[in-house]
Amino acid sequence: MDGVKKAYRGRFAPSPTGPLHFGSLVAATGSFLEARTRGGEWLLRMEDVDAPRCSSAAADAILRALEACGFEWDGAPVWQSRRGEAYAAALERLKPGGRVFPCACTRRELADSMLAPDGAAIYPGTCRGGLPVGRSARAWRLRVGDARIAFDDAIQGPMTSDLATDAGDFVLLRADGLFAYQLAVVVDDAEAGVTDVVRGADLLQSTARQILLQQCLGVATPAYAHLPVAVNAAGEKLSKQTLARPLDVGRPAPSLVAALDFLGQAPPPELAAADVATVWDWAVVNWRLARVPCGPAPCPVA
Ligand code: GLU
């Protein structure tokens, strides 16, 4: 450690699988305010690495919604779909040490595997010692070994993860030839010099995997703060799949004020009738990360 604290650099990294909804607005608002109130930069990255699930129409809609809400990002947005070479280079760097291995298993062959807390199959290790005779590589996985990862989340508190039982050897290059989110996010955050990740707590389960990957690639680990997740009446995370309502771009102030309220900032209700510039003036002066609650909470009807 050189003892010199790096200038704060945060980011917002939506997946353009649908329009901006209340859940993603919460992540944008929290990460933006934390960056701005700490005198930092705020970058925007379109996480369209999973091309079949993403669309350029959704990406456009997200950009328009962010603009309508008055978000201002530093530099041009980064598009993961254009960064395949950087991800391939990172995977190549992991090959010589044997930290990654090719895997021939099909989804059906893994169907009986134990499940990780996030519902994904824990890899049973079939190809860990080498590809079975006559089989060829479909995917590449990271060997997690007995890695235990601990980190201090600024909102959720101290976290630990035993990766063998919480995730297992996870995929970096998928059988369909696409790089996995876990690799893309680590490579992108490192290359952009992101110092602080503020995002939804639905990604808390991924953080230990990402920290292990950072360690394997020899890049810095950012500080983490995981915001509470907005859920619908059935307790499900708001998403395209749960039919979350898109943001009303014609009237963004009430949604922004609802996001601030959701994040524990207690905005005065009359702020909802103001213009977005006034909402941000209030928010920048009053934002306190320490007031953000940690548990999931229902989406307010904005
Ligand atoms: N693209 C992810 C999402 O929209 C966020 C990834 C991240 O912030 O690290 O859920």
Image (tube, rainbow, N blue to C red):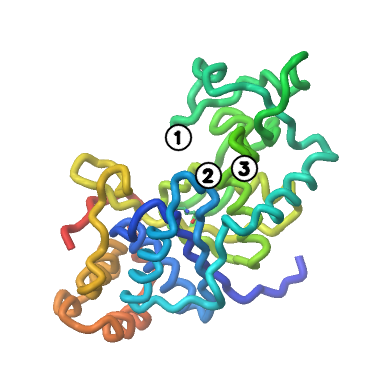
The numbered mark, 1 or 2, whose residue comes first in the sequence reads: 1
| Residues at marks 3 and 2 touching, judged by CB atoms closer than 8 Å | no
Nearest the eye: 185 or 209: 185
Residue furthest out toward the right: 96
- Amino acid beneath label 2: Ser
| Residue 260 picture location, percent across and down | 29, 68
CA gap between label 3 and label 1 equals 17 Å
Query: How many numbered circles are shown?
Result: 3
* Left or right of residue 9, residue 85 in this image: right
Q: Quadrant of the N terminus?
A: bottom right
CA gap between label 1 and label 2 equals 9 Å
| Residue 221 picture location, percent across and down | 64, 57
* Residue carrying label 3: 149
Residue at (60, 25) in percent of width and height:
123
> Which element is circle 1 on?
loop
Nearest the eye: 64 or 251: 64
Q: Is mark 2 within 8 Å of ligand 1?
A: yes
In the image, residue 76 above or below residue 113: below
- Amino acid beneath label 3: Ile
